[in-house]
């Protein structure tokens, strides 16, 4: 049975595996093949272990899990830039294992994230999506997200440029 719950430190390896496999599948053709092949579950696990083990961390990370197997995750918190107000939250990372795409897990995780952001008293939310990631753009648009015209370029693995689009969504009335 799949449950949505708070992530725990012992979920770090599963989150890392989802993170890497999602990048390798979703970004195929958008990022260089050698960059995708070089992504490391062990490297991502170290990052997620640090995040999930930090007692001072206050930004929620939720997982969709079947027993101890992580099938997807979402991390969120206050907007990290570009927001017009402190009332804006942000989805920092949102990934589902490619073997579980189109099974409703992403929708359940998304709903839980929206509920959490609303419970944290955010009025709106933002997220960044890789330009050209049409699958993600379609998912987000169907869930009420719209592009707000902002773009940015981040540095990705191997120093590659990641061109991203910002999407926005109202959570509740002010």
Image (tube, helix red, strand yellow):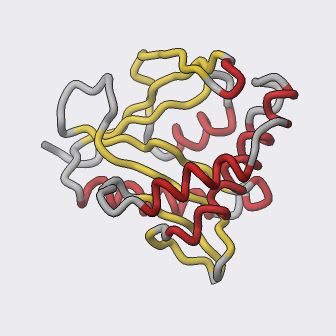
Please indicate whether residue 57 sits to the left or right of residue 26 in the image: left
Q: Is 114 above or below relative to 169?
A: below
Q: Is 11 above or below relative to 94?
A: below
Task: Identify the residue shown where x is 57% and y is 72%.
Answer: 10
In the rendered image, which quarter contains the N terminus? bottom right
Please indicate whether residue 120 sits to the left or right of residue 40 in the image: left
Task: Identify the residue shown where x is 65% and y is 68%.
Answer: 70
Q: Is 118 above or below relative to 151?
A: below
Q: Position of residue 137 (x, y in %)?
A: 59, 34
For this rendering, which residue is in front, 151 or 53?
53
In the rendered image, which quarter contains the C terminus? top left
How many numbered circles are shown?
A: 0
Task: Identify the residue shown where x is 50% and y is 54%.
Answer: 74
Q: Position of residue 129 (x, y in %)?
A: 55, 31
Please indicate whether residue 94 sits to the left or right of residue 148 in the image: right
For this rendering, which residue is in front, 14 or 72?
14
For this rendering, which residue is in front, 1 or 31?
31
Q: Position of residue 162 (x, y in %)?
A: 62, 20
Q: Position of residue 125 (x, y in %)?
A: 33, 40
The image quadrant of residue 105 is bottom right
Q: Is 130 above or below relative to 58?
A: above
The image quadrant of residue 17 is bottom right
Extreme left residue here?
174
The image quadrant of residue 58 is bottom left
Task: Identify the residue shown where x is 49% and y is 55%.
Answer: 50
Please indicate whether residue 104 sits to the left or right of residue 114 in the image: right
């Amino acid at each position: 049975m799949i449950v949505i719950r708070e992530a725990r430190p012992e979920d770090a390896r599963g989150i890392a595996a989802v993170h890497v496999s999602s990048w390798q599948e979703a970004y195929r053709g958008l990022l260089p093949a050698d960059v995708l092949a070089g992504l490391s579950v062990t490297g991502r696990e170290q990052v997620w272990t640090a995040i999930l083990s930090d007692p001072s961390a206050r930004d929620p990370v939720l997982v969709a899990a079947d027993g101890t197997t992580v099938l997807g995750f979402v991390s969120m918190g206050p907007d990290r830039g570009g927001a017009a107000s402190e009332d804006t939250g942000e989805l920092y990372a949102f990934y589902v294992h490619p073997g579980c795409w189109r099974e409703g897990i992403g929708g359940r995780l998304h709903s839980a994230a929206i509920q959490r952001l609303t419970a944290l008293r955010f009025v709106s939310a933002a997220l960044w999506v890789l330009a050209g990631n049409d699958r993600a753009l379609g998912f987000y648009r169907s869930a009420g997200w719209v592009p707000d015209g902002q773009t940015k370029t981040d540095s990705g693995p191997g120093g590659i440029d990641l061109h991203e689009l910002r999407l926005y969504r109202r959570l509740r009335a002010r």
